[in-house]
Amino acid sequence: MRLTVFGATGGVGRHVVTQALHRGDHVTAYVRNPARLDISHPELTVNAGALTDRDAVRRALTGADAVISALGPSLDRKATGMPLVNGTRTIVDAMQAEGVERYIGMATPSLRDERDTRSLLGLIVLLMGRTFLKRAYQELLDMSRIVAESPLNWTIARFTQPKDGEPKGTVRAGFLGKDKIGAAITRADIAGFLLDRTTDTRFRRAAPAISG
């Protein structure tokens, strides 16, 4: 496949790029600072630009089969503004202009899915976000709403405790209060789940919660 990856220099995004290349995909990584993506591969194209550059974002999407966004709000309490909200809107607009329908992103369970029912994990994450990370919490919700309210064929994977480490190769996925979902999951397994959604027809226009 031809994939365009945003957030490719982050903890999850880097795994998305390396795993996609390993399985034979062509990857266009759209990054602000190419020097941070120290990966070299004949099937990797690195496009430098800001999310505010609508023309550059659209060029990065030309010919793509799917978009994987590994963008996530800064958890720095000193951070200001919500740059990823407008950035996500730019990506969604560019996808529609280029005829790219498949969007795969990520969030936390503070984003609700209509299939969720009441759960302890959902309540804890919601309380923590509203109490301690208000700016990041609101940015994440606003980003996700732009995607969910678009006509795109989207999936947003929700997780709670990403960690480094070797992938387990198995991911539990479902909806809070209905399925057995834990908290911890490796970033490598998150990346694998996101990539699997490029060909798997489950979870279309849904936000499954995932864990290891």
Image (spheres, rainbow, N blue to C red):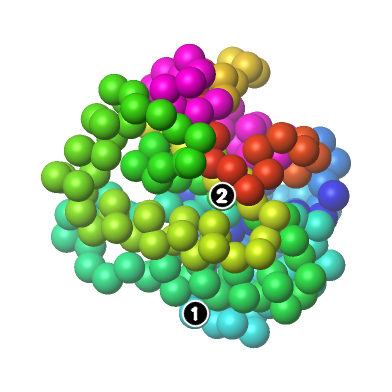
Does residue 181 show up magenta in the picture? Answer: yes
Q: Is residue 60 visible?
A: no
Nearer-the-camera pick, 166 or 147: 147
Question: Residue 50 in the image: x percent, y percent?
Answer: 51, 75
Q: Residue at x 17, y 60 (%)?
A: 78
**Which quadrant of the figure has residue 86?**
bottom left
Q: Residue at x 20, y 54 (%)?
A: 134
How many labels, in total?
2
- Please determine whether, in this image, residue 155 is positioned above or below residue 211: below
In the image, taking residue 53 as reference, residue 22 lies left or right, namely: right
Does residue 195 show up magenta in the picture? Answer: yes
Nearer-the-camera pick, 35 or 148: 148
Circle 2 sits on which residue? 105
Amino acid at pointer 1? Thr
Considering only order in the chain, which callout, 1 or 2, is on the residue closer to the N terminus?
1
Question: Residue 114 in the image: x percent, y percent?
Answer: 48, 41
Q: Residue at x 64, y 84 (%)?
A: 55
In the image, taking residue 18 as reference, residue 48 lies left or right, namely: left
Q: Are the residues tagged 2 and 1 within 8 Å (C-beta)?
A: no
Amino acid at pointer 2? Gly
| Residues packed near mark 1 inside 10 Å, few (<14), some (14 to 19) or many (20 plus) | some
Question: Residue 93 in the image: x percent, y percent?
Answer: 62, 75
Circle 1 sits on which residue? 52
Q: Secondary structure at mark 1?
A: loop
Q: Residue at x 69, y 70 (%)?
A: 95
- Please determine whether, in this image, residue 71 is positioned above or below residue 173: below
> Which stretch appears magenta?
174-197
Nearer-the-camera pick, 40 or 49: 49
Q: Secondary structure at mark 2?
A: strand
**Which quadrant of the figure has residue 129?**
top left
Q: Is residue 53 visible?
A: yes
Mark linked to residue 186? none
